[in-house]
Amino acid sequence: MELYTYNPITKSTTLSLLLPRMPLRPPAPGTAMVLAPRKGDLLTIRHGESVPDAWYGTYRQVYEVDVTEHRLVLSMPLLSRDPAFGFPSLVRLNCRVADPAEIVHRGIMDVSGALYLPIQRMLRRVSRSFDIGELHQAEDALTESMRTFSGDAALRLRNVTVEVVVDGNEIVASGRAYREIERDTRLMEMRRERHLRMLRRDGAEGLIAEIMEREGPRAAYDMIANAEREERQELLAAWQAVLKHSEADREPWESLQAERALRDRMNGGSSSPFGGIRSTRLRGTLAPAPALEDESRGSDGDGRRTSRVRGLRPTKIEDPDR
């Protein structure tokens, strides 16, 4: 069982000047007896040893000291290379009393309190060489620095380990933030892949359909109109350039071909999405197909039907059954 501290002096008794009713008995296993004589130095009696002058009232104070081994945990902050950040750490060690008389002489009643400052001073010399991000390296170096430390005359230490810990709330918060970032990244990748598939399949028209779904038909119409307007301005600028430089270093037939190509582009279908906004340039039609009665009304009495293409003569359609 790990403890945070303990008091090694388990009992203290003041002896009378008169002869005691009972002699002083040797200490029990796991304890030591420290006798304070009326004159002279402290005397330590361990388990199995006899007490000299047990009947004669030679001693004024008797102490019982716990000499068994205890597993202790010390919690201490250690500064990193940047003083604004630190390493919260737990120091675990096995501790036992080596000299009971020294314990009584120094008045040690809190073992962890007696060990805290010396151990912290030793560990800070090591921790200040590491950045806050080098947690594992700092932990190994701190444990290695304590490997040869065995305590002092009063206390003996062994199996000293240092664990750099992270606050539980901090772990939960950082884990939640990491999962949120991963989730948002995956969602963005899914949206990006969907948009790429749509653009590869439908091109700019698919993008306009997406805009129409999000912002309404007016936004889609304005985008198509702007694209057609920009295209027409470019064609007009090219037409003016051809007319201006038609006789400079160019054969007449070359100028004629360039004019014809520009004229076809200007009068023909637009390269803007959906063929532009003019009805003659739309791919297909948004209106339903005309009925047969409408077509019959559009023809004259002799079977001639008015052509839908301007510039072509009306064509008479002969019925082969007549």
Image (spheres, grey):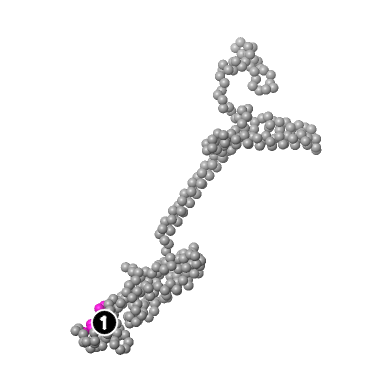
Rendered location of residue 309, percent (x, y) = 66, 23
The type of residue carrying mark 1 is Thr
Answer whether residue 44 is visible to the viewer in this image: yes
Q: Is residue 202 visible?
A: no
Q: Quadrant of residue 312?
A: top right
Residue at 62% of width from left, 29% of height from top? Answer: 278
Task: Confirm whether the magenta stretch covers residue 26.
Answer: yes
Quadrant in which residue 314 is drawn: top right
Q: Residue furthest front?
A: 17
Tally the marks: 1
In the figure, 315 relative to 156: above or below? Answer: above
Seen as rendered, the residue at the extreme top is 322
- Residue 22 is left or right of residue 215, and the answer is left
Coordinates of residue 33 in the picture (x, y in percent):
28, 81
Along the viewing direction, whichever of 196 and 54 lies nearer the viewer: 54
Crowding near the residue tagged with mark 1, few <14, some 14–19, many ≥20 C-alpha atoms within 10 Å: few
The percent coordinates of residue 184 (x first, y second) are 48, 48
> Which quadrant of the figure contains the N terminus?
bottom left
Q: Which residue is mark 1?
A: 14
Element type at mark 1 = strand
Query: Chief secondary structure of the magenta span?
Result: loop
Front-most of residues 157 and 314: 157
Quarter residue 32 falls in: bottom left
Q: Is residue 229 left or right of residue 183?
A: right
Range covered by the magenta-colored residues: 23-29
Image-based side of 82 in relation to 119, left or right: right
Q: Residue at x 28, y 83 (%)?
A: 61
Which quadrant is home to the C terminus? Answer: top right
Q: Nearer the viewer, residue 140 or 10?
A: 10
